[in-house]
Amino acid sequence: MKKNFSVFAVIASSAFFMGACTSNSQESKPEQSAPVGQEISATNQVAQQDTIKKSIPSQAEGTIGQTNVKISYHSPGVKGRVVWGGLVPYDQVWVTGAHKATAVEFSKAVIIDGTEVPAGKYALFTIPGRAEWTIILNKDYEQHLADEYDQKKDILRVKVKPETLGQHQERLKYEVVGSAETEGAISISWEKVQVSLPVGTNS
């Protein structure tokens, strides 16, 4: 009788132990889902990184006063390359984009560096320098890179100082910034450099 009781106790104890293990295993699944989810999220972030090799057709649009400003350009990436003084030579006219001239369109006349620029569409070129850039608006916006650039068609040239960005900008980025009721700027950022062209309006 004692032997039977001992066998029953062992079986009961084993059943309880297996049940407890099964219960703990089932209860642990939700606790494991959080780190799994985090791993998936991290993987998705890696997948979302810029893996496009080509320059991307892009647009920037905004308002300065009552004037709509639209910029159409191709955005190249750094891709680990030396940009300034390498990919983009210093002291040479640059399309400030890729494939074709960057186009800037103003819905109304604007004031840039004291010059009134009529409403219309223009090419935007730059001449990057180590300490100073020249930003150019040119009449001929339908051209390939700077191959056909003609200085005689310039509307204006403006000298600006480059600034150092606080963080890496992988792709060339244009922005239209309205800083006051009738004042703003066109901002160009790439790698660790940013330049801004002040733009004003009459309304």
Image (spheres, helix red, strand yellow):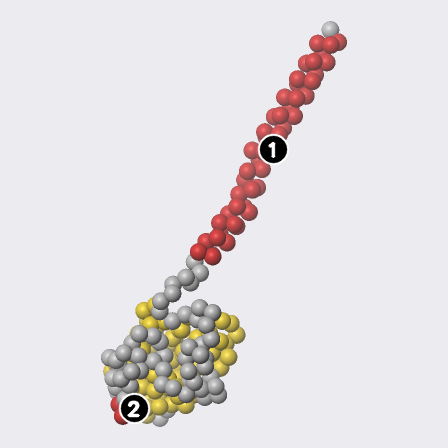
The residue that mark 1 highlights is: 24
Q: Nearer the viewer, residue 203 or 54?
A: 54
The residue that mark 2 highlights is: 151
Q: Nearer the viewer, residue 65 or 45?
A: 45
Q: Position of residue 123 (x, y in %)?
A: 29, 82
* Quadrant position of residue 87: bottom left
Query: Which image quarter is the C terminus in?
Result: bottom left
Q: Earlier in the sequence, mark 2 or mark 1?
A: 1
Residue drawn at x 45%, y 76% as measured from the top left: 83
Residue 180 visible somewhere in the drawing = no
**SS under mark 1:** helix
For marks 2 and 1, give the CA distance.
77 Å
Q: Position of residue 76 (x, y in %)?
A: 38, 71
* Quadrant position of residue 119: bottom left
Q: Nearer the viewer, residue 37 or 203?
A: 37
**SS under mark 2:** helix
Residue 42 visible somewhere in the drawing = yes
Total labels: the figure holds 2
Query: Which image quarter is the N terminus in?
Result: top right
Q: Position of residue 51 (x, y in %)?
A: 41, 61
Residue drawn at x 34%, y 87% as measured from the top left: 136
Graded by Cα atoms within 10 Å as few (under 14), some (14 to 19) or many (20 or more), the crowding at tag 2 reads some
- State the mark number for residue 146: none
Kind of residue at badge 1: Asn
Location of residue 186 with respect to 5 vertically, above or below: below
* Quadrant position of residue 63: bottom left
Location of residue 82 with respect to 157 vertically, above or below: above
Residue 167 in the figure: left or right of residue 75:
right
Kind of residue at badge 2: Gln
